[in-house]
């Protein structure tokens, strides 16, 4: 059975190198979140969510600096 598509818009693949300690911490968080939710949570889900948060914060900061 194929993995369900979680991203419902065009995508781009990108390889990233993480420190082992970073990956292990993300894996612990993913395990905890999966145990406390009804959805599957992966390290990749956490990374994508973190990127969204970073982009939003950057946009908010950029809006302030342009005024």
Image: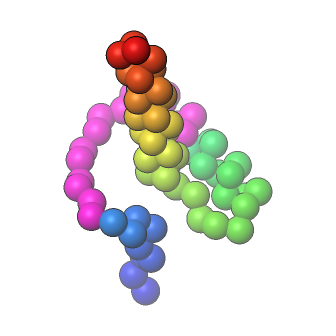
The part of the image, by quadrant, that contains residue 47 is top left
Residue span colored magenta:
10-26
Question: Residue 8: x and y, percent?
Answer: 39, 69
Question: Residue 5: x and y, percent?
Answer: 41, 73
Q: Is residue 13 magenta?
A: yes
Q: Nearer the viewer, residue 12 or 18?
A: 12
Q: Is residue 10 visible?
A: yes
Q: Is residue 21 magenta?
A: yes
In the displayed structure, would residue 5 be above or below residue 32? below
Residue farthest to the bottom, as pictured = 1
The part of the image, by quadrant, that contains residue 11 is bottom left
Q: Nearer the viewer, residue 27 or 53?
A: 53
**Number of numbered labels in the structure image:** 0
Q: Is residue 47 visible?
A: no
In the displayed structure, would residue 23 be above or below residue 40? above
Q: Is residue 29 left or right of residue 22?
A: right
Question: Residue 65: x and y, percent?
Answer: 39, 13
Question: Residue 53: x and y, percent?
Answer: 50, 36
Q: Is residue 34 left or right of residue 11?
A: right
- Residue drawn at x 43%, y 86% as measured from the top left: 1
- Residue drawn at x 41%, y 34% as measured from the top left: 55
Q: Specify the quadrant that holds the C terminus.
A: top left
- Residue drawn at x 40%, y 65% as measured from the top left: 7
């Amino acid at each position: 059975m194929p993995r369900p598509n979680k991203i419902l818009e065009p995508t781009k693949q990108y390889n990233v190198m993480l420190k082992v300690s970073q990956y292990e911490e993300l894996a612990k968080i993913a395990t905890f979140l999966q145990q406390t939710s009804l959805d599957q949570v992966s390290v990749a889900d956490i990374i994508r969510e973190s990127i969204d948060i970073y982009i939003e914060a950057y946009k908010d900061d950029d809006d302030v600096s342009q005024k």
